């Protein structure tokens, strides 16, 4: 492994790769990219291990894993595994594979992890609310010009900018 | 012609392997952009570094240009792509919530995966959070389910909303993205030079960016001038895919199958009558709609037919085969799934039911009841309607 990590790629270059991958996804599978659907499936699969009656009872869970249905048997799961592997390979190749916690310098590691968990919960909730996350709604829907996806995309940025000032302590150097 | 259905082509395991490969490309692109680092993502919201905006919009723009260029040239059938359904207000509310989660937690679902894959502990905590959040949503949904299903339009494109052609919309999106990139560059420059005292300028200082922008605009203009294929041109491109179904008459149904289908409560049947208005006024099937071929070339008219639920069936009837076949071709290439033609139109209709009676009464010819079927031998016709249950919408978010 290299000692000094490679620099990140130019954003337009990375974006162009992203665009070609997204196009390939549409051309080969009819639909674009996504992550939140698979995350929801993981939740349903875990819940099912402990409390399968509950999965049958809640509408959105039942749609994924009611009865004998295996919530994880879905193309989106393989896309998620691929994303994980791709991230791992790229981080390894570029010398960025390292156990660490990214945060602003004014908060402690524990604080950062609490906020990461909290932010994740809010994000997971919002992504189901919006029927897709940044990849499934904004990227995929944006590329095929879905009006709802464009409205969604702007509201993500608005939501972020509206709150950014109040949580600046989390990210300031 | 694209898109292909990789799972049908390669089987389940082969298809899933391709999904892993596509996912890997996605993960690599995100990692290369630096999206495995929450600080790099969060800084977007403090204007100092616009990487998120630049990468995201480049990705959207490049994919958008590739999709509509290949659709314009006849390499890809846009009507077969999954377009995210529009639930306008739930989408906006969900987006606002996500924006908050983004700035508090520093990731989005896809990027937290990449962060976790590169051993970032904060990414892992965020990812666990999203799993919990998805569960909380399912638990709380019953209290606002009506709102969550409101303001729904199935396939609603920005071009429909603007009332413009797809080509013109793609051009506008391209210009919009380039203007945003320009502003992003200048904002970054402003913050970079603010402390050093160096002056920033409006000039485009990076030559490669200028060339890149010229290429993107040129492609957008090309897409606009080529246009998206109308149904007639699209049929010429796609003829080989569908003409077999017409040649073998696999889509021509017997009047009795029409009666059977019409009386099935689970099926939503739409009958389009292509005869003259005069004939239609004289006699028509109950619930049928009098249309002409021009209507079927009108995207606004066809959109609801292409967006029928999986149990939707469209049946065409006309005075002769040449009209009904033309109508079938127009609708097929516009993405109407379960599409059939009533064999010989209404020519045999009256004759078929002429001397049949149910409970001593004449049959209502405009809407024969299911009992009629018992008056005919079981093998009176060969059933041909197969309900295609493939649901294109929904995609991977479901």
Image (cartoon, rainbow, N blue to C red):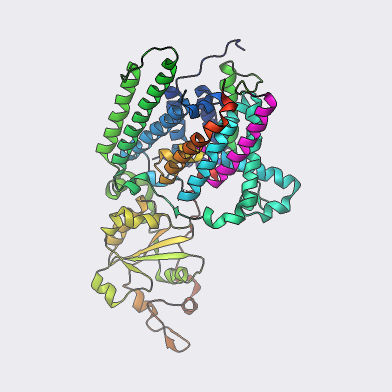
Q: Give coordinates of residue B329: x percent, y percent.
A: 32, 54
Q: In this view, does A143 lie above or below B142?
A: above
Q: Give coordinates of residue B356: x percent, y percent.
A: 42, 83
**B108 to the left or right of B193:** right
**B172 to the left or right of B17:** left
Q: In the rendered view of the protein, which quadrant contains the N terminus of chain B?
A: top left
Q: In this view, does A126 lie above or below B174?
A: below
Residue B194 showing in the rendered view: yes
Q: Which of A164 and B40 is in front in this view?
A: A164
Q: In the orientation shown, which residue stands out farthest toward the right?
A: A50
Q: Give coordinates of residue A58: x percent, y percent.
A: 65, 54
Q: Is residue B394 above or below residue A163?
A: below
Q: Nearer the viewer, residue B293 or A34?
A: A34
Q: Which of B13 and B272 is in front in this view?
A: B272
Q: Majority secondary structure of the magenta segment?
A: helix
Q: Give coordinates of residue B230: x percent, y percent.
A: 28, 47
Write down the quadrant of residue A20 in the picture: top left
> What span is colored magenta in the figure?
A107-134
Residue B87 showing in the rendered view: no
Q: Nearer the viewer, residue B43 or B211?
A: B43
**A143 to the left or right of A109:** left
Write down the quadrant of residue B357 in the picture: bottom left
**B296 to the left or right of B198:** left
- The reply to whether the magenta stretch includes residue A123 is yes
- The reply to whether the magenta stretch includes residue A164 is no
């Amino acid at each position: 492994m290299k000692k000094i990590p490679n620099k990140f790629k130019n954003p337009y270059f990375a974006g162009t790769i992203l665009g070609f991958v997204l196009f390939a996804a549409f051309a080969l599978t009819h639909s674009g990219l996504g992550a939140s659907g698979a995350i929801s499936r993981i939740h349903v699969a875990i819940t099912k291990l402990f409390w399968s009656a509950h999965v049958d009872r809640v509408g959105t869970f039942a749609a994924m894993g009611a009865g004998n249905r295996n919530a994880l048997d879905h193309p989106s799961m393989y896309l998620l595994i691929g994303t994980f592997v791709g991230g791992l390979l790229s981080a390894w190749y570029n010398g960025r594979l390292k156990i660490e916690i990214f945060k602003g310098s004014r908060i402690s590691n524990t604080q950062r992890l609490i906020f990461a968990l909290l932010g994740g919960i809010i994000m997971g909730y919002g992504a189901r609310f919006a029927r897709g996350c940044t990849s499934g709604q904004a990227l995929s829907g944006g590329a095929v010009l879905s009006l709802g996806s464009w409205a969604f995309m702007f509201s993500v940025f608005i939501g972020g900018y509206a709150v950014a000032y109040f949580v600046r302590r989390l990210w300031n150097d | 012609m694209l898109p292909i259905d990789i799972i049908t082509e390669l089987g389940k395991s082969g298809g899933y392997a391709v999904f892993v490969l596509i996912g890997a490309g996605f993960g690599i692109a995100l990692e290369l952009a630096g999206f495995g680092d929450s600080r790099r993502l969060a800084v977007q919201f403090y204007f100092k570094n616009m990487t998120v905006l630049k990468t995201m919009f480049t990705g959207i723009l490049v994919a958008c240009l590739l999709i509509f260029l290949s659709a314009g040239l006849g390499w890809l059938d846009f009507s077969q792509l999954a377009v995210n359904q529009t639930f306008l207000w739930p989408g906006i509310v969900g987006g606002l919530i996500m924006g908050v989660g983004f700035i508090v937690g520093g990731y989005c679902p896809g990027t937290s995966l990449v962060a976790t894959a590169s051993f970032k502990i904060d990414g892992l905590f965020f990812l666990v959070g999203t799993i919990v959040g998805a569960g909380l949503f399912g638990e709380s949904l019953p209290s606002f389910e009506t709102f969550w299903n409101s303001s729904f339009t199935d396939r609603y494109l920005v071009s429909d909303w603007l009332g413009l052609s797809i080509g013109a919309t793609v051009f506008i999106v391209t210009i919009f993205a380039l203007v945003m990139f320009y502003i992003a560059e200048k904002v970054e420059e402003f913050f970079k030079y603010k402390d050093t005292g160096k002056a920033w300028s409006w000039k485009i200082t990076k030559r490669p960016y200028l060339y890149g922008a010229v290429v993107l605009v040129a492609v957008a203009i090309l897409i606009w001038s080529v246009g998206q294929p109308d149904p007639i041109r699209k049929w010429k491109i796609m003829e080989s895919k569908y003409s077999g179904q017409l040649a073998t008459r696999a889509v021509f149904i017997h009047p009795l199958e029409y009666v059977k289908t019409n009386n099935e409560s689970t099926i939503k049947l739409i009958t389009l009558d292509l005869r003259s208005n005069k004939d239609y006024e004289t006699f028509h099937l109950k619930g049928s709609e009098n249309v002409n071929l021009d209507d079927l070339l009108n995207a606004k008219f066809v959109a609801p037919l292409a967006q029928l639920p999986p149990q939707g069936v469209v049946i065409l009837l006309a005075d002769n085969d040449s009209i009904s076949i033309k109508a079938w071709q127009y609708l097929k290439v516009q993405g109407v799934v379960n599409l059939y033609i009533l064999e010989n139109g209404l020519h045999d209709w009256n004759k078929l039911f002429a001397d049949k009676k149910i409970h001593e009464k004449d049959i209502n010819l405009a809407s024969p009841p299911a009992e009629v079927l018992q008056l005919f031998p079981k093998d009176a016709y060969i059933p041909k309607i197969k309900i295609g249950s493939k649901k294109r919408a929904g995609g991977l978010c479901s």
